[in-house]
Image: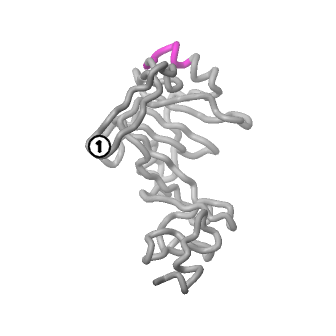
Amino acid sequence: MKDPYGNPITCIIYQDGRPFTVVAGGNIYDFDWCPGSGLLAWHLSGSGFLPYVSRFCEPEGQPGTLWLARKTLISNDCGKKRANPIVRKSSSSTWIDWYRPAKPMTGPKAKRRLRRYGYRLIKSPWLLPGKTLNPFDAEDSIGGDTEYCSICEERIFDDPAYLCEHLEWCDLCGRMSGPGADSPCRCISNPADRS
């Protein structure tokens, strides 16, 4: 199984019977179920990491089901906090690194830690709609972002063809707006502010 860029999938976390997070070649993808459209939308949310696990915050029942490819290294927690943080710089930004890299784990030690964190481990990925194990190839899977509608109380695929009546895209400011948007723009809600 591979992601859209040809990287092998090494970790899949399932929640509520669907893929929730997928790690492939150091890329981390988030999956959001959009019940109104029946779509499972995914987007690249980060990269350059080992599969990272930690305890769930306020889990109800079983927090997550996890599949790991053989010999996959996982990182537990963020590592230990440094007494003196390191300032790191890239060509576009500067940030403060407070944590030491977490020590990667594999094998029985990793499995014990995962169970202690509340994960249920499975030996093979689940069969998804379209009779595939690969979350990117499932028949309800689509690449793209989602928006949360506070009125519908669900995730909506971020495409004009799928938006509910409470959300609309504002071309003036490049943001989602409408009564269901998290932080609606003022362009659409207040035409006097358009200048």
Which contiguous range is marked in magenta? 104-111
Q: Which residue in the rendered view is the most extreme toward the front?
A: 84
Q: Amino acid at mark 1?
A: Gly
**Front one among 173 and 39:** 173
Image-based side of 184 in relation to 42, left or right? right
Image-based side of 189 in relation to 91, left or right? right
Image-based side of 170 in relation to 93, left or right? right
Q: Percent from the top left, x then y, of residue 105?
A: 46, 17
Q: Work out which quarter of the rendered image holds the N terminus and state it.
A: top left
Q: Which residue in the rendered view is the most extreme toward the left?
A: 91
Q: Quadrant of residue 172?
A: bottom left
* Magenta span dominant secondary structure: helix
Q: Residue at x 57, y 46 (%)?
A: 18
Above or below, 77 relative to 29: above
Badge count: 1
Q: Is residue 107 magenta?
A: yes
Q: Residue at x 64, y 33 (%)?
A: 56
Q: Residue at x 53, y 81 (%)?
A: 193
Q: Percent from the top left, x then y, of residue 45?
A: 44, 46
**Front one among 19 and 21:** 21
Q: Label 1: which residue?
A: 6
Above or below, 111 relative to 55: above
Q: Percent from the top left, x then y, of residue 158?
A: 49, 65
**Front one among 128 and 161:** 161
Q: Percent from the top left, x then y, of residue 25?
A: 34, 36
Q: Which residue in the rendered view is the most extreme toward the right?
A: 60
Image-based side of 173 in relation to 19, left or right? left
Q: Residue at x 51, y 23 (%)?
A: 76
Q: Which residue in the rendered view is the most extreme toward the top?
A: 109
